[in-house]
Amino acid sequence: MPKIKTHKGLSKRVTVGARGKVKRKKAGMSHLMSGKRGKVKRRLRKNGVAVGADAKKMRRALGKG
């Protein structure tokens, strides 16, 4: 059985914690910031966590289970 290759594009964008949580950056923070309220910008600064089937696919693509 061949080894599973790591998806390099995904590995640069997400990290997998010790307990298997997939941490990611929230979308909508790259441009068009002047139209967004301060409350929204502060909320987008924090890291998000991928959940459910998406997290499972990401872990598999990273070779972490």
Image (cartoon, rainbow, N blue to C red):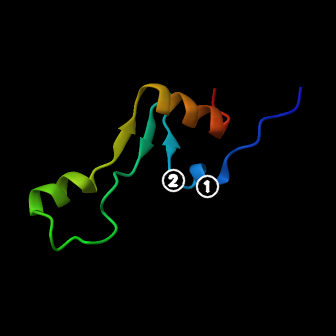
Q: Is residue 40 left or right of residue 31?
A: left
Residue appearing at x 63%, y 26% in the figure: 65
Q: Position of residue 3 (x, y in %)?
A: 83, 34
Q: Amino acid at mark 2?
A: Arg
Q: Is the residue under label 1 in contact with that under label 2 (CB below 8 Å)?
A: yes
Q: CA distance from mark 2 to mark 1?
A: 7 Å
Quick check: can you spot residue 14? Answer: yes
Q: Amino acid at mark 1?
A: Gly
Q: Position of residue 42 (x, y in %)?
A: 17, 57
Classify mark 1: helix, strand or loop. Answer: helix
Please name the residue that numbered disc 2 is placed on.
13
Classify mark 2: helix, strand or loop. Answer: loop
Q: Position of residue 11 (x, y in %)?
A: 59, 49
Mark 2 crowd level (few <14, some 14–19, many ≥20, 10 Å Cα): few
Residue appearing at x 49%, y 32% in the figure: 55
Say which mark, if any, is on residue 48. none
Say which mark, if any, is on residue 9. 1
Quick check: can you spot residue 18? Answer: no
Q: Is residue 1 left or right of residue 46?
A: right
Q: Position of residue 56 (x, y in %)?
A: 54, 28
